[in-house]
């Protein structure tokens, strides 16, 4: 029966070769090939990341030099400041982290790593990108309409977000909300593809525990997303009606409850951070295994703790609401669950450390990024403990301490994770090797300044500096020279970090044009994507040579073998 | 431009056909969307006993007729599935057609119901109860419309003997739409 | 509607024998009960009857549709677990949110015990126990004994105006117009002490100047404001 299926496909494939369809732009716009869709997500996501980074540049300049006419923007009014921080946060999470870590890497890697020729629903895949792209356009539009972009923070609490008389951005707030809702739909559609493809379309011989961890992580993240976003979609429809139809879902005077929005938002918002964390951990683990030449210390351990993290993540949400007026007894419960959730995540970090221990470590650029992920995320994680304790949070809530905590987690996830995966799979995606020297310069030029941005912010937060304020010179306790100098340090470090990103772009372009040709498997890794051409052709493998799997993906350093790696598809 | 179905789509490591697997996952996500909305409504309704006055104006008999319509349409949908299993595409298409007719009947009755209510001043902003009423029933109606359209496409193919497995899949989705209404009916019309 | 009457409602799905017509009739009967039950319940004031018939029957109907029409009972266990998880998750969410949202008294939660303690403390019992007395005492201790205009200038003003009042503070470097240089005679042309007081209190925009000089009136008592103005005047060259 397998032969029949293969034969049919072979004929169709041959047919395709003669009728390759329109070429050029149209081919790319309407392609259903998972690799092309992945690249569309990747580059759209990275472009949005540049926009989000530009916004950070502008508002940090305003914070360090209040009143300045920022080069490349102009003077920042309070309303514009709010719009900048709101859209910075929204863009980085919804339009950078998710598209790159889940949609781009998921789309690219899952079919390749499980030995399939594409996703199981290629046209739904294409639709999901198109919906995503529309959400990008709507978000961009929201920044240029009358009144400007929405400025009510990415958390969008009513009544600020529901009443135009408060937020002063009648059109902007509705467009922002619509863009977010469409992004959710795009990822629901995409998620279906990832989940069903992983469950069903694996190569013959690939059992559940032979699947590379990054694929598991992306699928678990998709399931987490799907289960948590539902109530928020309902809540967002309600908010949209409050904004446009003047309903009173969140208006206490009319029987509504603004705190309800907080619950719905954070019921999604907290699992969401694990939705982006798990794929980043998956990428890091793949890189660590390959460049330690060692099996993952506990494959099943990682898998089960990832699931445990996902499950637990549904029960911690109210730690974002400790001082919103909730019953402290409820806060007690959420303190306990929040502190508990640090355990499985720490567990995964321990597995990484244990994998490195005794390994034959190669400090390639991807490996440096993976190690940086571990170190920086560790700092982010432990500072979360302070915030998870409701007593301490009374002081820390809404200060820069929170902001520094989540940047010490999100930056490793969204930025370090992206660079880690991108530099690791670049040879496969583009058939060329990246320049190692430039890669390392970019690495150090990103990671060192990063710490100089956010450690000052921890100090500022402990000193009582609150979030979402556009000019601290208006507050005497925060206007003094020590605080001021910390703010300036952070901004200057950001400027340095931005400058070093040019090295990355130069490296990408140079390598694409005249990088050293990469073979099928430049890193000598085991998983299936390294058994095909770089870049893989349409269909990934010739239809009569689809891989068959004989072992797991981390068989490195086997004593009986000459080579220190053992590809999954090599017969025993 | 023809897209050959990938080899991946025909594989089934779990033993569940890929299409059906996907529909179950879609339903899981719909459960949390509707569950979220209905859960929110229930919390509000329990916290606002004074909404009983507003709620008393929903017309139970109209809701009941619509419930009957949807139940019957679920019946025709499952009969369509049965016909498709036997390979009888034309019969499946006709039964799907009847299901779509049920959907349209539902929508027409609902339009008349809403027009009537709005003309009496029970608009979406009249009272937060009505806001929930229109939002929940409206979200459901959107799913009815989407389901009817997809069902039309499936019926079109089935009549020509193509993609008969999709009859089951759209049926499963349609039964879910029916189940949501099975809970909406008591919530909005009976135990109001 | 039918061609083979005798096999009309019977399904043979992959070997499972399902009487679809029978299920349908059961559903209709249940539906009629669910409509009739509340009528009876309302008439006789038996609210439990309404709830049981309305929701209880809804559960039964849903069960019948899900298991028999959607064939879930013959589906692999994994998918049953997935769907059950999404339902249970929603129940847990409602359970987690209700304690908060179901209190619609204005503030969602009030610590009445703490409030009472504060009131006791403020009520004048100097040796009172509980958070109230401590809060009152603590507040008294926290307020500084004296006010120093020089010290306040150093904290509030110097970052823009410089420690020496020369307009050369670090935060002022990038501003347009630059912060005032109080040691410059040209600055004092047309400006007097009254204007200084006004600008400190209401911000420079209040006298037609730049909004970059914010109003600080909320920080100071009238007496303190006069002291700070005196300190600014002390930079004026004679």
Image: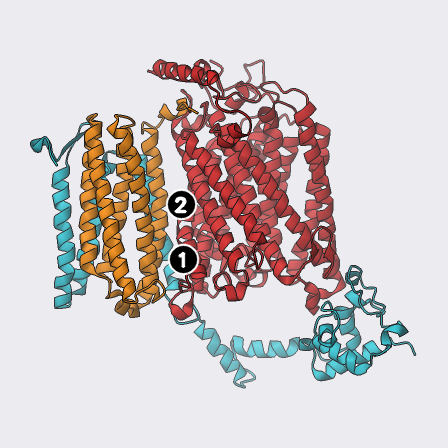
Chain colours: A red, B orange, C cyan
Q: Which residue matches tag 1?
A: A238
Q: Which of C155 and A304 is in front in this view?
A: C155
Tell me if C46 is positioned left or right of C233 in this view. left
Residue drawn at point x = 65 percent, y = 77 percent? C141
Task: Examine the rendered structure and indicate whether residue A458 appears above or below residue A209.
Answer: below
Q: Is residue A384 above or below residue A515?
A: below
A474 or A49, nearer to the observer: A49
Residue at left 53%, top 75%? C131
How far from the left and from the top, in percent, is residue A302? 49, 35
Asked if the residue at tag 2 contacts the one at tag 1, i.e. Cβ–Cβ closer than 8 Å, the answer is no
Name the residue nearer the viewer: A193 or A538. Answer: A538
- C60 on left or right of A97: left
Residue A437: x and y in percent read 73, 29
Residue A227 marker: 2
Q: Disc 1 to disc 2, how far (Cα)?
A: 19 Å
Q: Position of residue A492 (x, y in %)?
A: 74, 50
Quarter holding the N terminus of chain A?
top left
Q: Which of C64 and C9 is in front in this view?
A: C9
How packed mark 2 is, by other alpha carbons closer than 10 Å (few <14, some 14-19, many 20 or more), is: many
Q: Is residue A378 visible?
A: no
Q: What element carries label 2?
A: helix
């Amino acid at each position: 029966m397998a032969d029949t299926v293969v034969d049919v496909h072979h004929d169709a494939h041959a047919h395709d070769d003669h009728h390759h369809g329109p070429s050029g732009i149209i081919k790319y716009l309407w392609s259903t090939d998972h690799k092309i869709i992945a690249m569309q997500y990747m580059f759209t996501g990275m472009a949005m990341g540049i926009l989000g980074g530009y916004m950070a540049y502008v508002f940090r300049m305003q914070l360090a030099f209040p009143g300045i006419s920022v080069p490349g923007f102009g003077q920042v009014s309070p309303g514009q400041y709010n719009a900048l921080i709101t859209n910075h946060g929204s863009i980085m999470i919804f339009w950078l982290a998710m598209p790159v870590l889940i949609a781009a890497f998921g789309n690219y890697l899952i079919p390749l790593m499980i030995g399939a020729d594409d996703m199981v629903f290629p046209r739904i895949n294409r639709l999901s990108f198109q919906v995503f792209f529309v959400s990008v356009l709507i978000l961009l539009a929201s920044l240029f309409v009358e009144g400007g972009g929405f400025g009510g923070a990415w958390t969008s609490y009513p009544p600020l977000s529901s009443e135009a008389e408060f937020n002063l951005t009648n059109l902007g707030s509705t467009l922002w909300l619509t863009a977010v809702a469409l992004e959710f739909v795009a990822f629901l559609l995409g998620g279906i593809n990832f989940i069903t493809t992983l469950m069903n379309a694996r190569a013959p011989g690939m059992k559940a525990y032979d699947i590379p961890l990054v694929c598991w992580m992306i699928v678990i993240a998709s399931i987490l997303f799907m289960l948590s976003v539902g109530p928020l979609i309902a809540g967002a429809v309600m908010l949209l009606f409050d904004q446009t139809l003047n309903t009173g879902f969140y208006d206490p005077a009319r029987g509504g409850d603004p705190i309800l929005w907080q619950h719905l938002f954070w019921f999604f918002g907290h699992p969401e951070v694990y939705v982006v964390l798990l794929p980043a951990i998956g990428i890091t683990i793949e890189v660590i295994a390959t460049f330690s030449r060692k099996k993952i210390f506990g494959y099943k351990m990682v898998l089960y703790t990832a699931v445990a993290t996902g499950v637990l993540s549904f029960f911690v949400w109210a730690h974002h609401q400790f001082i919103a007026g909730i019953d402290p007894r409820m806060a007690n419960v959420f303190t306990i669950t929040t502190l508990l959730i640090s355990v499985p995540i720490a567990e995964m970090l321990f597995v990484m450390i244990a994998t490195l221990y005794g390994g034959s470590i190669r400090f390639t650029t991807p490996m440096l990024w993976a190690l940086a992920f571990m170190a920086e995320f560790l700092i982010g994680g432990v500072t979360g403990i302070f915030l998870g304790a409701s007593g301490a949070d009374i002081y820390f809530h809404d200060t820069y301490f929170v902001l520094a905590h989540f940047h010490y987690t999100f930056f490793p996830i969204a930025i370090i994770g992206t660079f880690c995966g991108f530099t690791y799979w670049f040879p496969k995606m583009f058939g060329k090797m990246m320049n190692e020297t430039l890669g390392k310069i970019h690495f150090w030029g990103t990671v060192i300044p990063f710490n100089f941005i956010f450690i000052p912010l921890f100090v500022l937060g402990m000193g009582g500096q609150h979030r979402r304020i556009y000019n601290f010179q208006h507050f005497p306790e925060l206007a003094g020279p020590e605080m001021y100098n910390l703010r300036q340090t952070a901004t200057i470090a950001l400027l340095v970090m931005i400058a070093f990103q040019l090295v990355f772009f130069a490296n990408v372009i140079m390598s694409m044009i005249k990088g050293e040709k990469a073979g099928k498997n430049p890193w000598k890794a085991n998983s299936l994507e390294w058994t095909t051409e770089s870049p893989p052709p349409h269909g990934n493998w010739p239809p009569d040579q689809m891989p068959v799997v004989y072992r797991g993906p981390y068989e490195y350093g086997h004593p009986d073998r000459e080579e220190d790696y053992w590809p999954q598809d090599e017969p025993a | 431009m023809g897209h050959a179905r990938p080899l991946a789509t025909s594989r089934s490591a779990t033993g569940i056909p890929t299409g059906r697997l996907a529909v179950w996952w879609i339903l899981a996500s719909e459960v949390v969307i509707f569950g979220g909305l209905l859960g929110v409504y229930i919390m509000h309704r329990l916290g606002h006993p004074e909404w009983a006055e507003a709620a008393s104006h929903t017309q139970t008999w109209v809701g009941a007729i619509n419930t009957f319509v949807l139940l019957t349409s679920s019946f025709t949908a499952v009969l369509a599935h049965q016909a498709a299993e036997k390979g009888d595409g034309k019969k499946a298409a006709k039964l799907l057609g009847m299901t779509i007719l049920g959907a349209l009947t539902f929508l027409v009755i609902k339009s008349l119901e809403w027009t009537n209510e709005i003309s009496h001043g029970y608009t979406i902003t009249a009272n937060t109860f009505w806001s929930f009423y229109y939002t929940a029933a409206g979200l459901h109606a959107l799913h009815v419309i989407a389901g009817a359209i997809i069902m039309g496409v499936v019926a079109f193919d089935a009549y020509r003997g193509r993609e008969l497995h999709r009859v089951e899949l759209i049926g499963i989705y349609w039964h879910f739409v029916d189940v949501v209404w099975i809970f909406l009916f008591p919530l909005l019309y009976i135990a109001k | 509607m039918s061609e083979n009457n005798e096999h009309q409602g019977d399904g043979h799905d992959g070997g499972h024998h399902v009487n679809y017509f029978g299920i349908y009739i059961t559903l209709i009967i249940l539906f009629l009960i669910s409509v009739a039950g509340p009528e009876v319940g309302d008439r006789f004031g038996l609210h439990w009857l309404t709830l049981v018939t309305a929701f209880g029957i809804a559960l039964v109907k849903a069960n019948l549709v899900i298991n028999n029409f959607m064939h879930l009972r013959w589906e692999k266990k994994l998918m049953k677990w997935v769907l059950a998880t999404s339902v249970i998750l929603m129940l847990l969410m409602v359970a987690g949110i209700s304690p908060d949202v179901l209190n619609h008294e204005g503030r969602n939660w009030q610590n009445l015990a703490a409030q009472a303690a504060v009131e006791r403390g403020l009520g004048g019992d100097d040796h009172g126990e509980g958070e109230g007395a401590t809060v009152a005492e603590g507040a008294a201790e926290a307020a500084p004994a004296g006010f120093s205009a020089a010290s306040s200038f150093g904290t509030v003003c110097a970052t823009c105006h410089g420690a020496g009042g020369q307009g050369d503070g670090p935060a002022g470097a990038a501003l347009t117009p630059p912060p005032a240089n109080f040691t410059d005679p040209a600055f004092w042309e047309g400006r007097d002490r009254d204007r200084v007081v006004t600008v400190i209190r209401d911000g420079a925009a209040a006298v037609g100047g730049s909004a970059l000089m914010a109003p600080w009136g909320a920080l100071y008592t009238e007496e303190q404001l006069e002291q700070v103005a005196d300190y600014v005047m002390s930079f004026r060259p004679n």
